Amino acid sequence: MPETLAWKDIDTVFLDMDGTLLDLHFDNHFWLEHVPLRYAEKHAIPVAQAKHALYPRFRAMEGTIDWYCIDYWSRELGLDIGALKRELEHLIQVHPHVADFLRVLRASGRRVALLTNAHHRVVDLKMTATGLAEHFDQLICAHAFRIPKEDPLFWPRLATEDPFDPQRTLFVDDSLPVLRAARDFGIRHLRAVRLPDSKAPPKQTGEFLAIERFDELTPGLVTRRHSGLPRQPSHPRQPSHPGQPSHPRHSGAGRNPKDDM
Ligand SMILES: [Mg+2]
């Protein structure tokens, strides 16, 4: 039986994207099957040989910001990773009950932010494919800080950029190293995700309470439009790159101009 969240103690909600709101099947299929396929075609080698060459290179970069960087992999592999992702756009899927949960959450007046390690061009692709962006006050790309969420330096940096009270924050993510970094920073309300990839077995979620579906989080989540909670932080922020709608906005100081399209 899932444990009910103490919503009365929560003002800010950070939600991971891949594997949490969206089915990780897209990403797993992309990196484990589609990239090796296109790499094999490029080099005229068998797909099995491409996998043998690529998998260790992927593993070696896990936990670093470059692991999430499509520019890095485009350079490393000599492939247009952004274009290859668009080839598989039809596989981008929202997990069950996510849209309904986001609708109720947004109506409750709490600050709602997407918080992802993904490159902002991948976020754009996925938000366009799913239509989820309208549910967020902010789309925050850790990539813009050049520090991934699993790095203990990420959380103080985020709190400096966009202050929040860790004691009154809920964070949902499918990565245990990321959840541990958030817990060590002091984020009080944490949930792991038991089914990040719809085509894979359930994931062990270690010491964290976990959800299988997002409707498990709705009990107790009541609208409180008149609570006086600000919908957004009071300081205005420019969109981080040209052509990006100002609401919701991408956040992240220190974005390197070369990251932009
Ligand atoms: Mg994730």
Image: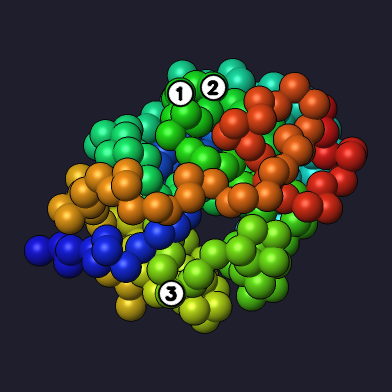
Measured Cα–Cα span from mark 2 to mark 1:
5 Å
User: Measured from the top left, where is residue 219 in percent x and y?
Assistant: 16, 53
Q: From this viewpoint, is residue 33 visible? A: no
Residue 27, percent from left and from top: 52, 39
Task: In this rendered view, identify the residue nearer to me: 52 or 64.
Answer: 64
Indicate the secondary structure of the residue bearing disc 2.
helix
The disc label shown at residue 31, or none:
none
Q: Within 10 Å of the Cα at label 3, are there few (<14), some (14-19), or many (20+) other Cα atoms?
A: some
Q: Which residue is mark 1?
A: 131
The residue type indicated by label 3 comes to Gln
Against 140, is 247 above or below? above
Left or right, 13 with reference to 227:
right
Q: Mark 1, residues whose alpha carbon is within 10 Å: few (<14), some, or many (≥20)?
A: few
Q: Amino acid at mark 1?
A: Gly
Q: Residue at x 83, y 39 (%)?
A: 259
Q: Quadrant of residue 75?
A: top right
C-alpha span from label 3 to label 2: 32 Å
Q: Which label is found at residue 167? A: 3
218 relative position to 10: left or right: left
Nearer the observer, 249 or 108: 108
